């Protein structure tokens, strides 16, 4: 059996690429801006640090804050929420299935 392919983000934590999460929609960019100033650990974060934590370009976080972009890949959304110290569902809404769709056995038999 093959081992699942993994990659490391900038925090050197492994992300299983075979089990990618759906994209996540930002709930409110003003809320993101506010919690960046007052994180769960009390230390504010900036766009560059948050981007490095999430494994995305710093411009992506800037685009979220300005409204140019409204989604992040699932892994990045979870990393942003962890760094800020809130549950991911406070900041983001999943936009797709979080588990793969299953095919009925009778559909495969035909």
Image (tube, rainbow, N blue to C red):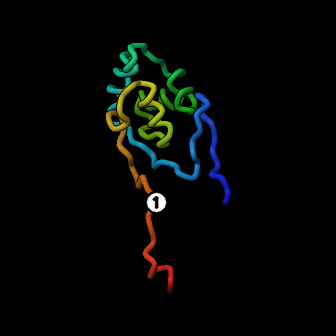
- Residue 17, above or below 89: below
6 and 60: which is toward the camera: 6
Q: What residue occupies the far front of the structure in this picture?
A: 1
Instruction: Please name the residue shown 46% across and 17% down the image.
Output: 45
46 and 103: which is toward the camera: 103
Q: In this view, does 28 lie to the left or right of 48?
A: left
* Position of residue 23 measured from the top left corner of the image (x, y, whole percent): 45, 46
* Position of residue 109 measured from the top left corner of the image (x, y, whole percent): 50, 84
Instruction: Please name the residue shown 32% across and 32% down the image.
Output: 28
* Position of residue 83 measured from the top left corner of the image (x, y, whole percent): 45, 25
Q: Would you call the spot at circle 1 few (<14 residues within 10 Å), some (14-19), or many (20 or more)?
A: few
Instruction: Please name the residue shown 48% across and 29% down the image.
Output: 61
Q: In which quarter of the image is residue 105?
A: bottom left
Judged from the image, the secondary structure of the residue bearing numbered disc 1 is loop
Figure quadrant of the N terminus: bottom right
Number of numbered discs present? 1
Instruction: Please name the residue shown 57% across and 46% down the image.
Output: 16
Q: In which quarter of the image is residue 59?
A: top right
* Position of residue 4 measured from the top left corner of the image (x, y, whole percent): 62, 52
Q: What residue occupies the far top of the structure in this picture?
A: 43
Q: What residue occupies the far bottom of the structure in this picture?
A: 110
- Residue 38, above or below 78: above
Q: Can you identify the residue that label 1 sits on?
A: 100
């Amino acid at each position: 059996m093959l081992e699942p392919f993994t990659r490391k983000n900038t925090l050197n934590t492994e992300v299983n690429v075979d089990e990618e999460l759906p994209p996540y929609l930002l709930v409110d960019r003003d809320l993101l801006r506010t919690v960046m100033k007052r994180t769960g650990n009390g230390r504010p974060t900036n766009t560059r640090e948050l981007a490095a934590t999430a494994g995305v370009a710093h411009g992506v976080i800037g685009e979220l804050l300005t409204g140019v972009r409204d989604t992040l890949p699932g892994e990045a959304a979870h990393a942003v929420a962890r760094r800020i110290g809130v549950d991911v569902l406070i900041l983001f809404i999943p936009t797709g299935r979080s588990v793969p769709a299953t095919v009925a056995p009778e559909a495969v038999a035909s």
